[in-house]
Amino acid sequence: MRKLTLIFLCFLFSFTSGWSARLFDGVDDKIAPSSAFDLDDFTLEFWAKTTTSGQKAFIGVVETGTAGLLQILTNLDKDDLAAADKTKFNVRVSGGEHDTAEFLNAAVYDGSSHHHALVRSGDTTTYYVDGSSQTLTYLVNSLSTSTVTITRTIRIGARNLRGTDDLFLDTTIANFRIWKRALSAAEVGALASCGHVALTARHIDYPLWGTASPEADLSGNANNGTVSGAVAADHICGPYR
């Protein structure tokens, strides 16, 4: 009986440990959460597997006036980022306060799975890849402790440029979360090791299991996301829970 029980548990684990992800085709795929939000300290965290070239968006929203901007762009090869294998993020709390930085990490674009975490705590921003903080080159470094107010819905796998979507991503993303707090380095490291952190204080929590639209928000905030095109892909990191 113990042997049969063990066999059953192994069989069950094989169906619960390997979650799916979402595959974006680089043309018009995106996920659009259902609400805007305000954030003070926060963490934006996800898994990605990409060889993307050119300027694309893991996540992006661009506002007008004094509203906020939040975006992470990939492997840039134009504008102020001439070299490939660079990643850029931009956080804006008002028209005159920006935090824009880039880092060079070729491993992000090697076609393997990597964990990303953008952590904002007070007036300090840290970007982690696979649990290791990156050396940032700041283009603008004047972010205050003001709240980041996002009044336009964000896009995952694209950028919402004042109502027009662009910079479509061609990669796989899984386990996308926006936390309402700054995760510690230890917590980021645990998540990067496919470990567990108490899933509290989240604004958005998408497992990205590659199922039907809308993508269910597991945060409890009912921010379900409309999926356009992104389909199921092999899992990146599991188990999710």
Image (tube, grey):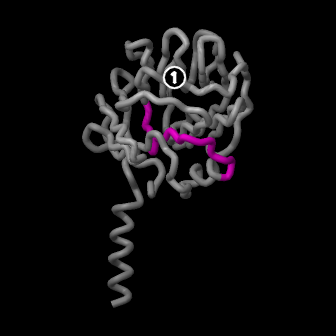
Crowding around mark 1 (Cα neighbors within 10 Å: few <14, some 14 to 19, many 20+) is: some
Where is residue 87 shown, x and y percent of the image?
A: 61, 26
Residue under the image location 38 percent in, 13 percent down: 164
Residue under the image location 67 percent in, 47 percent down: 184
Q: Going by the image, does 237 lie left or right of 145?
A: left
Residue 39 can be seen, yes or no? yes
Q: Quadrant of residue 102?
A: top right
Q: Which residue is mark 1?
A: 53
Where is residue 2 shown, x and y percent of the image?
A: 37, 88
Q: Is residue 172 magenta?
A: yes
Q: Going by the image, does 103 lie left or right of 193?
A: right
Q: Residue furthest bottom?
A: 1
Read off the magenta span. Answer: 171-186
Q: Quadrant of residue 41?
A: top right
Query: Image quadrant for the N terminus?
Result: bottom left
Residue 233 can be seen, yes or no? no
Residue under the image location 69 percent in, 43 percent down: 132
Identified by mark 1, the residue type is Ser
Where is residue 60 shown, x and y percent of the image?
A: 48, 23
Q: Quadrant of residue 133?
A: top right
Where is residue 63 shown, x and y percent of the image?
A: 49, 14
Q: Going by the image, does 103 lie left or right of 171?
A: right
Above or below for 162 versus 2: above
